[in-house]
């Protein structure tokens, strides 16, 4: 798999992106590159600006952090399946940078939703994480819940709608919400993560504001019943067709709920790993996490989040196909406590990406017809 000029595997680590989780992705990308085994891998930094422009090289993180809109050199990943290389263009001409596998540490839209995975498939490049379908299903909270509910997995009650419907008939939507839910509730963009655009709502005024905020990030809105006093539990999954589940951990949020500030800025939220729950509850969560992973057609990694009510009932909240991936992120910590340290985890994910790619490339993609009918006028 390594390029001919080097025995090291060239790993294109992609970060940034056109997403509300742009900053989180930059930090995840830095962490992955630092953790790569230098004896085995060569990091190829690939930054994507907020505007969607690509930049490769050692200065990529610097430019993204400085938010310079005009880049010195722009890079592209051609969809030609025979190239497997980045092409950089400037006034002097073009330069190519080979990549053997990509690690897209992209969170949110245009990175975790199947779009960039489609580009990798077209370019025939191995990549870490779920494919087009799994990524898209994991990103859309509504479709994800619809599929998981068909398995009778325990989910909190929810209602969803499009912003266009809200603008034309919010009174009917509000009635539908409270025919099925009661305060407090959570209003969320259907396609985003890191708690961006989420509001905990306790009255009608907050509902209007919450929908307005969520609608800035997505045209599809989901409203979920809050589980009062619930504990937030998480389980990490690793693997392809025979995935494994980590120990279960608990998040104790520093804010009223585990919002963006509590996750990344405040630094006061606490993790308890393993969570202080019964073995029976832990085993049930692991089984549900693995079932959700397989049902949503996931590969490589995912973090599955749960609620545990005061009465002891477990609810599956959501699955994330590319969770925060620094060495101190919950996904990494869960595997560290399960016996897989961060550097080994990064290597394992790259191995899984290459193995899946090699298996898929053995499939036949053409069909030899016994007639040249299509050449006829």
Image (spheres, helix red, strand yellow):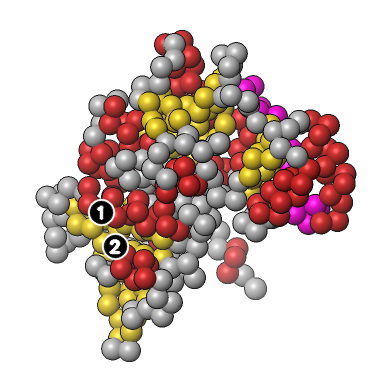
Circle 2 residue? 45
Residue shown at 47%/34% (left/top)? Answer: 253
Per the rendering, the mark at residue 181 is: none
| Mark pair 2, 1: CA separation | 8 Å
Within the magenta stretch, is there residue 151?
Answer: yes
Estimate the x, y position of residue 276 in percent, counting from the top left.
41, 17
Residue shown at 35%/51% (left/top)? Answer: 28
User: In this view, which residue lies farthest toward the bottom?
Assistant: 91
Q: Decide which of tag 2 and tag 1 comes sooner along the chain.
A: 1
Residue shown at 29%/27% (left/top)? Answer: 337
- Looking at this view, is 162 or 132 the one in front? 162
Residue shown at 26%/61% (left/top)? Answer: 44
Q: Mark 2 and mark 1 in contact? Answer it, CB < 8 Å.
A: yes
Within the magenta stretch, is there residue 280?
Answer: no
Estimate the x, y position of residue 90 in percent, counting from the top left.
33, 84
Count the marks: 2
Circle 1 residue? 33
Query: Which of the 4 image quarters holds residue 92?
Result: bottom left
Helix, strand or loop for disc 2: strand
What stretch of residues is rendered in magenta?
149-166
Looking at the image, residue 159 sits to the left or right of residue 115; the answer is: right
Query: Which of the 4 image quarters holds residue 308?
Result: top right
- Looking at this view, is 144 or 279 the one in front? 279
Helix, strand or loop for disc 1: helix
Q: Is residue 301 visible?
A: no
Q: Residues within 10 Å of mark 2 (few under 14, many from 20)?
A: many
């Amino acid at each position: 798999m390594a390029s001919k000029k080097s025995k090291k595997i060239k790993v294109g680590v992609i970060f940034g992106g056109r997403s509300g989780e742009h900053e989180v992705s930059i930090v995840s990308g830095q962490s992955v590159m630092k953790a790569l085994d230098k004896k085995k891998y060569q990091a190829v930094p690939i930054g994507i600006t907020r505007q969607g422009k690509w930049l490769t090289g050692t200065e990529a993180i610097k430019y993204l952090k400085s938010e310079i809109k005009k880049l010195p050199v722009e890079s592209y990943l051609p969809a030609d399946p025979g190239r497997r290389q980045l092409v950089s263009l400037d006034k002097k001409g073009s330069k190519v940078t080979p990549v053997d596998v990509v690690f897209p540490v992209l969170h949110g839209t245009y990175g975790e939703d199947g779009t960039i995975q489609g580009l990798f498939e077209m370019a025939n490049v191995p990549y870490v994480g779920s494919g087009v379908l799994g990524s898209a299903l994991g990103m859309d909270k509504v479709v994800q819940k619809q599929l998981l509910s068909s398995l009778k997995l325990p989910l909190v009650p929810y209602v969803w709608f499009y912003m266009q419907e809200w603008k034309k008939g919010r009174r009917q939507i509000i009635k539908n919400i409270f025919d099925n839910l009661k305060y407090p509730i959570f209003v969320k963009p259907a396609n985003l993560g890191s708690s961006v655009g989420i509001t905990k709502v306790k009255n009608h005024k907050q509902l209007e504001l919450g929908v307005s905020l969520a609608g800035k990030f997505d045209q599809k809105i989901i409203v979920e019943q809050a589980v009062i006093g619930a504990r937030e539990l998480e389980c990490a999954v690793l693997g392809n067709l025979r995935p494994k589940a980590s120990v279960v951990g608990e998040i104790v949020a520093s804010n009223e709920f585990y919002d963006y500030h509590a996750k990344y800025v405040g630094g006061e939220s606490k993790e308890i790993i393993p969570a202080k729950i019964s073995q029976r509850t832990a085993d049930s969560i692991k089984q549900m996490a693995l079932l959700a992973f397989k049902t949503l057609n996931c590969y490589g990694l995912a973090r599955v989040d749960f609620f545990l009510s005061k009465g002891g009932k477990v609810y599956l909240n959501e699955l994330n196909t590319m969770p925060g991936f620094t060495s101190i992120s919950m996904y990494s910590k869960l595997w560290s406590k399960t016996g897989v340290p961060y550097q080994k985890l990064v290597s394992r994910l790259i191995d899984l990406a290459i193995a899946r790619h090699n298996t898929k490339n053995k499939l036949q993609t053409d069909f030899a017809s016994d007639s040249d009918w299509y050449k006829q006028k």
